[in-house]
Image (cartoon, grey):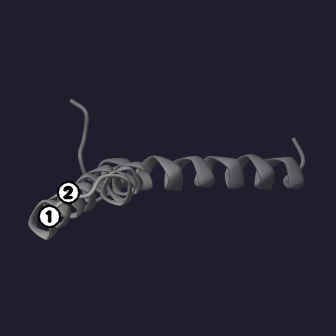
Amino acid sequence: MNKITKMFIALIGACSIVLDILTPLVVAIVIRSVFYLSPTVSSGILIIGGLGTLFRGIKSGGWLKNE
């Protein structure tokens, strides 16, 4: 494989990781915008989405080992 192919594959992998990490937050934002919710419930959903994103970031960063 030449360098350009390796760079392209690395770029695709990085995009995949970013989308995988941000999925819970995007789902929370979509739920918040589609449904009319009270401010408390809306904030709770965003917090849960943010925590899900944080967990996936930590998991993909390698800090959590699958043993």
Residue designated by label 2: 45
Q: Which of the marked residues, 2 or 1, is nearer the chain's N terminus?
A: 1
Residue 50, given in percent of the width and then of the height, sits at 26, 62
State the separation of the CA atoms marked 2 and 1. 11 Å
Give the foreground label among 2 and 1: 1
Residue plotted at (30% across, 48% down): 59
Three-letter amino acid code at disc 1? Answer: Ser
Residue type, mark 2 in image: Ile
- Where's the N terminus, which quadrant? top right
Coordinates of residue 5 in the picture (x, y in percent): 85, 47
Q: Residue at x 57, y 47 (%)?
A: 16
Instruction: Report helix, strand or loop for mark 2.
Output: helix
Q: Residue at x 20, y 57 (%)?
A: 45
Indicate the quadrant containing the C terminus: top left, top right, bottom left or bottom right.
top left
Q: Nearer the viewer, residue 62 or 45?
A: 45
- Residue 47 vertical placement versus 63 (above, below): below
For this orientation, the residue located farthest to the front is 36
Q: Position of residue 31 (x, y in %)?
A: 33, 51
Categorize mark 2 by other alpha carbons within 10 Å: few (<14), some (14-19), many (20+).
Answer: some
Mark 1 — residue? 38
